């Protein structure tokens, strides 16, 4: 796997690069701003671009704009956006077009190396990664006649993993259940929430997030 | 004839020492008296009386034209009166020398009666013409002058000017020996004899004018715009030509309301001015008809009222300027605070938070190299948890300092997160396509976040709604809940702080919170 990193904090950028290299992932570009990142993405066509959401010069929305641009211009390059804050609105904005090959994680996740690498690989394969904090915020959101109340605790766990972008296999591995059991949970949840079943797992993420948002 | 003029003259002199009109009336009275001496049987008084025979006709004209200042303001008036005196006195002396008036004439040199008669006819006709010309001057002079407005009094005085017509007719009757001479004489003397009463009323009219000052005070109390002040003063002074000049101390010059320079008239010119002072400081000047100088009391009263009004206006302007300044400084303080918070948030985000994330990462890599020493791994794990907790705390602090997501992505995105975290179901409706000014967005964000926090803490509501809309150059933020109402809007509450924030942007925060009827918070923030 080949990765480009855009992060203006040198300490973090180098730490991240080292972590990736240790996992035998090739870091093809290290950028401090979006112009350089876009240049490297054009030049090297990496599998994933890891982008800090706040980048120079204004430290406002440069990172997100670069991520969306990469998804539009380079369909083969996935993006994983890192943020210091959990912003539901921001995650939804990033994923609003498509959740395919898109991830949004809190920076803290980097140090949970195994989880982080798994999310990275999933995104690189065209899947999605949504920070668990975002998912739990959305699930905890207060609703009138809460349809989530009809879910069993186990189904809730599955829903959270599903919304984070986990595949059925991923869910099965995480909850230590069989793949068939995971699939049963998923279809039961879709039934209870009245969601139409979707083909790909990333479309499933979007459907679930949209449901949770409304 | 003598008595009314002398008495009226004395009263006028006493009440209006500055005016020459009083003395003029007294002189007119004495002149009439002197002309009356011609009825004497003794030679000397008769001769004196003869000299003054026609003087009353001219001096009455003089009196009428000189009302009310006692001066002949215009050149034609002076000429006319001069010619009158010349004809009445000069030719009378010639007549005396020619032996007119019979045996008691002490000054007769020759006796040329027919020549004297011719001169007399000329005198009478000329003086008649002078009187008629005087009436014309009187009425043309009234028009457009300050006196025009004082219609009632002017009318009274002018009606007595008809006496001059009677006088003119009388002179003609004398010249052509009309049979009705005596009747005309009675009418003429009657009218002219009563005229001093009218003069006196006219002169002392200032007392009546006081009530116009009272009206002025009432009108000034209503705080009229500066542009209307001259008209009000004009009405009070009954001088439509009144202008107002403002003193500009910083330029040491006079100017009108539009700022154009104004020259104050000099003494003795066709206009006069009265300074308006307050506490010894000159504020402005009234430029008016010089005849008003005769009514010192009225002028003083009006300029005192004007002084109060102008001082009020100045104080108000000053207050407004200070308010504006205060509003500006409140906004600057708020903006400076906001900038500082933004800077701190940036510093935290780019500094401590990044370092902690990097540190956590380093610890993690160290842990991997450490091998299987369970005690060391546990300690490192402990350290990483500490870092995670610190990061969490820092995040809350930084987010509380400044909602960076508002700056970066606007209200819609920021409110989405806010509503997701709210402790009750919130219906969010953001009718906003584009970004607005950052201070407005941040204020709107705080209004929503503080209101939702209040609802969570106090309202015991089951649901709430947040609506953002753009309406008529305003961003309208409305938060409604179905809770218990009766929210505390007093000082020290979060709502007061919000009001400060909103008002500093020239906006308005309103709260409806009837007990048991839910709470509605509405902020209106101006935005282009």
Image (cartoon, coloured by chain):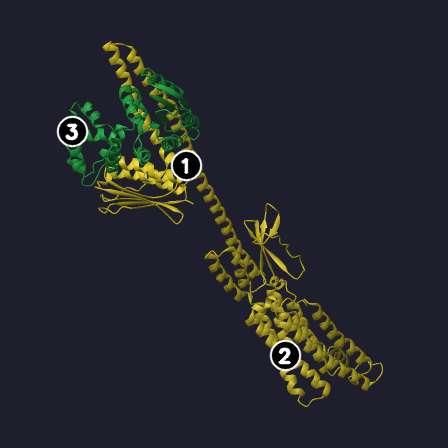
> Is residue B493 in sight in this rendering?
no
Q: Is residue B270 left or right of residue B218?
A: right
Q: Residue B271's x, y, as percent?
A: 64, 60
Whether pointer 1 and pointer 2 mark residues with C-beta atoms closer than 8 Å, the reply is: no
Q: Residue B412's x, y, as percent?
A: 33, 39
Badge nearest the viewer, 1 or 2: 1
Determine if marks 3 and 1 fall on one subunit: no
Q: Chain of mark 3?
A: A
Q: Which residue is mark 3?
A: A154
Q: Which residue is mark 2?
A: B163
Q: CA distance from mark 1 to mark 2?
A: 80 Å
- Above or below: residue B387 compared with residue B225: above
Q: Is residue B327 left or right of residue B266?
A: left
Chain corresponding to green in the figure: A
Chain corresponding to yellow in the figure: B
Q: Which mark is residue B334?
A: 1
Q: Chain of mark 1?
A: B
Badge nearest the viewer, 2 or 3: 3
Along the line of sight, the residue nearer the viewer: A170 or B92: A170
Q: Chain of mark 2?
A: B
Secondary element type, mark 1 = helix
Q: Quadrant of the C terminus of chain B?
A: top left
Secondary element type, mark 3 = helix
Q: Residue B516's x, y, as percent?
A: 22, 46
- Above or below: residue B143 compared with residue A27: below
Q: Quadrant of residue B193?
A: bottom right
């Amino acid at each position: 796997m080949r990765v480009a990193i855009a992060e203006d904090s040198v300490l973090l950028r180098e730490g991240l690069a080292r972590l990736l290299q240790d996992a035998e992932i090739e870091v093809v570009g290290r950028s401090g701003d979006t112009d350089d990142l876009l240049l490297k993405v054009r030049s090297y066509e990496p599998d994933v671009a890891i982008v800090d959401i706040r980048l120079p010069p204004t430290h406002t929305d440069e990172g997100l704009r670069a991520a969306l641009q990469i998804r539009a211009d380079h369909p083969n390059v996935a993006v994983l956006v890192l943020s210091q804050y959990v912003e539901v609105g921001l995650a939804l904005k990033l994923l609003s077009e498509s959740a395919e090959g898109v991830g949004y994680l809190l920076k803290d996740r980097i140090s949970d190396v195994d989880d982080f690498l798994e999310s990275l690989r999933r995104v690189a394969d065209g899947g999605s990664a949504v920070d668990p904090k975002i998912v739990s915020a959305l699930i905890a959101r207060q609703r009138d006649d809460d349809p989530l109340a009809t879910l069993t605790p186990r189904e809730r766990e599955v829903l959270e993993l599903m919304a984070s972008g986990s595949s059925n296999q991923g869910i099965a591995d995480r909850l230590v259940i069989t793949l068939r059991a995971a699939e049963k949970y998923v279809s039961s949840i879709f039934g209870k929430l009245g969601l139409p079943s979707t083909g790909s797992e990333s479309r499933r993420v979007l459907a679930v997030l949209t449901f949770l948002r409304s | 004839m003598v008595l009314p003029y002398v008495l009226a003259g004395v009263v006028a002199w006493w009440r209006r020492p500055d005016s020459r009109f009083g003395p003029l009336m007294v002189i007119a009275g004495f002149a009439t008296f002197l002309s009356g001496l011609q009825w004497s049987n003794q030679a000397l008084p008769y001769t004196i009386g003869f000299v003054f025979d026609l003087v009353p006709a001219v001096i009455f004209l003089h009196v009428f034209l000189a009302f009310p200042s006692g001066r002949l303001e215009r050149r034609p008036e002076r000429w006319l009166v001069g010619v009158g005196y010349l004809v009445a006195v000069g030719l009378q002396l010639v007549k005396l020398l020619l032996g007119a008036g019979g045996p008691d004439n002490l000054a007769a040199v020759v006796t040329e009666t027919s020549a004297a008669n011719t001169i007399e006819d000329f005198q009478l006709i000329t003086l008649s013409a002078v009187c008629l010309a005087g009436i014309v001057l009187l009425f043309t002079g009234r028009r457009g002058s300050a006196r025009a407005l004082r219609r009632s009094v002017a009318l009274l005085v002018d009606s007595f000017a008809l006496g001059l017509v009677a006088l003119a007719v009388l002179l003609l009757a004398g010249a052509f020996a009309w049979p009705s001479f005596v009747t005309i004489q009675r009418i003429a003397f009657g009218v002219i004899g009563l005229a001093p009463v009218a003069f006196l009323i006219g002169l002392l009219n200032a007392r009546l004018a006081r009530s116009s000052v009272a009206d002025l005070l009432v009108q000034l109390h209503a705080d009229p715009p500066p542009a209307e002040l001259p008209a009000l003063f004009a009405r009070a002074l009954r001088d439509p030509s009144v202008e107002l000049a403002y003193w500009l101390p910083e330029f040491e010059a006079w100017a009108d309301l539009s700022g154009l320079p104004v020259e104050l008239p000099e003494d003795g010119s066709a206009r006069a001015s009265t300074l308006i002072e307050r506490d010894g400081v000159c504020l402005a000047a009234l430029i008016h008809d010089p005849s008003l100088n005769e009514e010192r009391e009225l002028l003083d009263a009006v300029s005192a009222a004007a002084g109060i009004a102008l001082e009020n206006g100045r104080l108000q302007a000053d207050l407004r300027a200070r308010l504006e300044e205060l509003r500006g400084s409140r906004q600057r303080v708020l903006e400076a605070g906001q900038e500082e918070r933004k800077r701190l948030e940036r510093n935290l985000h780019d500094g401590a938070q990044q370092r902690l994330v990097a540190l956590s990462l380093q610890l993690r890599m160290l842990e991997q190299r450490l091998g299987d020493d369970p005690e060391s791994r546990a300690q490192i794990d402990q350290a990483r948890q500490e870092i995670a907790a610190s990061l969490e705390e820092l995040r809350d602090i930084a987010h509380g300092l400044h909602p960076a997501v508002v700056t970066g992505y606007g209200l819609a995105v920021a409110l989405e997160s806010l509503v997701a975290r709210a402790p009750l179901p919130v219906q969010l409706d953001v009718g906003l396509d584009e970004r607005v000014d950052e201070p407005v967005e941040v204020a709107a964000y705080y209004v929503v976040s503080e209101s939702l926090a209040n609802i969570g803490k106090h309202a015991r509501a089951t649901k709430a709604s947040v609506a953002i809309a753009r309406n008529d150059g305003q961003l309208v933020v409305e938060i409604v809940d179905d809770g218990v109402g009766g929210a505390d809007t007093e000082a020290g509450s979060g709502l007061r702080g919000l009001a400060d924030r909103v008002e500093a942007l020239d906006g308005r925060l309103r709260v409806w919170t009837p007990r048991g009827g839910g709470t509605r918070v509405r902020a209106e923030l101006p935005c282009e």
